[in-house]
Amino acid sequence: DAGVTQSPTHLIKTRGQHVTLRCSPISGHKSVSWYQQVLGQGPQFIFQYYEKEERGRGNFPDRFSARQFPNYSSELNVNALLLGDSALYLCASSLSGDEQFFGPGTRLTVL
Amino acid sequence: QKEVEQDPGPLSVPEGAIVSLNCTYSNSAFQYFMWYRQYSRKGPELLMYTYSSGNKEDGRFTAQVDKSSKYISLFIRDSQPSDSATYLCAMGPLNSNSGYALNFGKGTSLLVTP
């Protein structure tokens, strides 16, 4: 069985640019969550979607947005990138929201 | 004070030792608890998941939860060099209306030496 997949693996952007990160959940899972992990810290919750509806939002600015598609895949969008947005962005897949399985992450570097 | 506290280590043990990893938390609403293993530059891998106080065993791993003390532990028996990684505790409230947001500790770096 395929696990959670994320794309791209790495990307480099400059300040002020926009980025879109993509996630495909485990087959049959209807919930996707997004987390930001900066070096040396645990992941921080950004969003959770269930059945295409936003179910939860963490303490992140409005520059961060997300959506979930009918096939349960998801996109995370970040506008007006700042240096501090450099991090590993993790997507987690879940059947109902609680037990979460993570993908390999997308490493974003903002220059 | 952070809601979840975890000693970042590093923790170094010889191969075959029993490893004890711990987290404390302050939010009484947290009702489900997880342990993840994260290798360098990879995504976290779910090791253990429990709702209940008490012990849960899976192979060489035992998760222990004490809700009255707000304290959780992960024990690794017969540790192997391949167990060298960062171990993250995570927990959250059982409230589907606001999303199952996981609250993580900073992670404990473990090194198992041959």
Image (cartoon, coloured by chain):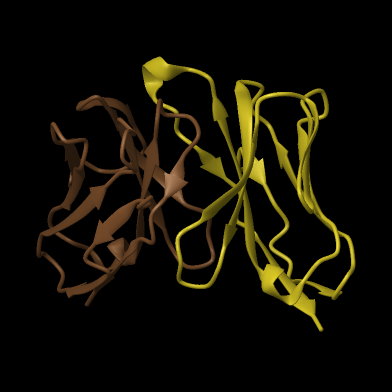
Q: Quadrant of residue B73?
A: top right
Q: Is residue B61 above or below residue A19?
A: above
Q: Is residue A70 above or below residue B109?
A: above
Quadrant of the image for the C terminus of chain A? bottom left
The residue lying at 24 percent from left, 24 percent from top is A51
Chain B shade in the render: yellow
Q: Is residue A96 left or right of residue B46?
A: left
Residue B95: x percent and y percent?
Answer: 47, 17
Residue B25: x percent and y percent?
Answer: 69, 36
The residue lying at 76 percent from left, 50 percent from top is B59
Q: Is residue A36 left or right of residue B5?
A: left
Q: Quadrant of residue A5?
A: bottom left
- Name the residue furthest left: A17
Residue B8: x percent and y percent?
Answer: 69, 62
- Name the residue furthest right: B17
Res. B86 visible in picture: yes
Q: Is residue B112 above or below residue A21?
A: below
Query: Foreground residue, B90 or A101?
Result: A101
Chain A shade in the render: brown
Residue B66: x percent and y percent?
Answer: 81, 29
The residue lying at 15 percent from left, 69 percent from top is A15
Q: Is residue A94 above or below residue A77?
A: above
- Name the residue furthest bottom: B114
Res. B1 visible in picture: no
Q: Quadrant of residue B24?
A: top right
